[in-house]
Amino acid sequence: MKEPTNFVAADPEPVDLSNVSLTREGVGSTWETSWRAFGRRFHGVWTRQEYIPNERIVDHVSTGAIWTFTTTQDSDGTTLSLAFAFTSKWPLANKIISWLLPTQDRQLDRMLANYRQAIQS
């Protein structure tokens, strides 16, 4: 998951990735994505805020999204978890996003299924 190409590849919606700049430590890496949603084109600049190998990755997007990946060891091997949060300076935007977030859970489930398939193949 250190490479943003892995994240983008798992997204069930088409996402374009560009301007990737990775740091050796992971923290401070940046990249840009663009995608279509609600009939509009969106663009985000990503910054890796936290990177603890085999434990946790936190990415912040200029759109206000925060993606958190965690891995935990369990009796069956390793469990990958993915969480999404959104914050905005505009209260109305926060209300709209909160209303739309239930659909984000389905997106996260599809992404995790795509990761599982890639790992097991």
Image: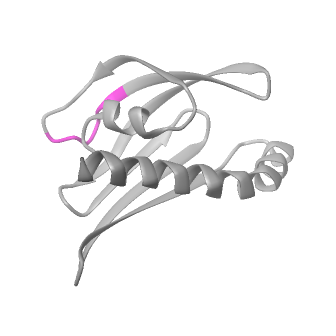
Q: Quadrant of the N terminus?
A: top left
Work out whether residue 54 or residue 109 is closer to the camera in this orientation and state it. 109
Segment colored magenta: 25-30
Residue at 60% from the left image edge and 49% from the top image edge: 107
The outermost residue toward the bottom is 75
Where does residue 59 sit, x and y in percent of width and height? 41, 45
Seen as rendered, the residue at the extreme left is: 24
Q: How is the image coloured?
A: one colour
Q: Nearer the viewer, residue 113 or 22?
A: 113
Q: Residue at x 82, y 48 (%)?
A: 91
Question: Does residue 106 appear to the left or right of 71 in the view shown?
Answer: right
Relative image position of residue 65 (x, y in whole percent): 57, 44
Q: Is residue 72 above or below residue 89?
A: below
Q: How would you classify the magenta stretch by its main secondary structure?
A: loop
In the image, farthest residue toward the front: 121
In the shown orientation, is residue 98 left or right of residue 75?
Answer: right
Q: Residue at x 72, y 42 (%)?
A: 89
Question: Along the line of sight, which residue is nearer the eye, 48 or 9?
Answer: 9
Residue 81: % across, % down: 41, 64
Is residue 101 rendered to the left or right of residue 78? right
Task: Residue 98 in the image: state x and y as whole percent.
Answer: 77, 55
Say how many tags the image has: 0
In percent of the image, x 73 and y 58: which residue is there?
102
Residue 121, above or below 30: below
To which quarter of the image does residue 93 belong? top right
Q: Is residue 75 magenta?
A: no
Up the image or down, 9 lies above or below 34; here it is below
